[in-house]
Image (cartoon, grey):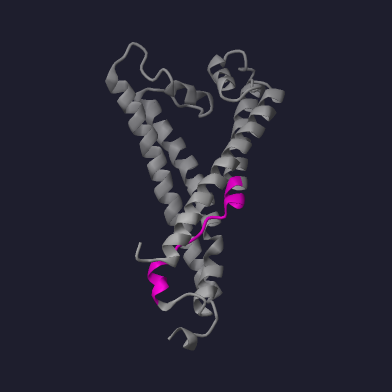
Amino acid sequence: MIKDIPVAIDENLLRATVKLNTFLFAGVAGFLGGLTLLCLTYLSLLRGLPHPGLYLNLLGVFLPGYSVSPAGAWVGFAWGGLLGAISGAVVYRIYARSIRRQVADYLAGNMPEHALEFAVLKIHGHSLGLALGGMTGTGLLLATNWLVIRGAADESPHAGLLSHYLPGYSVSLPGSVIGAVETFVIAYLVCVLASAIYNRVATRRQKDPGQ
């Protein structure tokens, strides 16, 4: 019975499990990210339009070496894999923050015995928003200023297209700061909203496993 289980958590096992799952999740996210960009690039090439990859080529502004070409597709696979793996690792580490609390609640008998089968992890929207918002905002800031340092700001009109979605953004130091702040805010709000919806559904599911 639950009451006979000691309220103790094997910290070494918990850390090892989280570490292993972080690597697994990062690997899967990296593979999917790279494969997605690879497939999109080849799909664009196969369409055989006069200007294949007209919009995908914009990624080359931020991903050095990438272009809509057979060779560029594999460069995109590498970049997509790297960025996907980093994003996956960050997301899982945040997602795993609540594991210790939920395991402790279960061992303490605060969850019914049958609930283990339906136990779900909650997402901490604030932390997730800070992490992903900070990552995307910093990425835009660094990528934009890399163009400025290279002296390619005037030669990157495609990057300036982001100003249609991020008012005030431009390929310049002040513009990159404005764009980074706006990107952070958008990503943060999306994460908070998505986590709130997910946690509400997860809570209802946990309270009523029969649903």
Q: Position of residue 59 (x, y in %)?
A: 48, 26
Residue found 43% across the figure and 53% down from its top: 25
- Displayed quadrant of residue 149: top right
Residue at horizontal 39 percent and vertical 33 percent from the top = 37
> Which residue is at a point 38% across and 29% down the rendered structure image?
73
Name the outermost residue toward the right: 174
Q: Tell me if residue 87 is in the magenta stretch.
A: no
User: Residue, x 48% and y 75% (percent of image)?
Assistant: 111
Residue, far bottom? 4
Image position, residue 39 (x, y; %): 33, 32
User: Could you say where residue 146 lies in the image, as x and y percent from the top left?
Assistant: 62, 27
- Where residue 114 sits, quadrant-wise, is bottom left
Q: Main secondary structure of the magenta part?
A: helix
- Say which quarter of the image contains residue 161: top right
Find the residue positioned furthest to the top. 50
Residue 128 within the segment the image draws in magenta: yes
| Numbered disc total | 0
Q: Which residues are magenta?
A: 114-129
Quadrant of image for the C terminus: bottom left
Asked whether, in this view, residue 182 is left or right of residue 81, the answer is: right
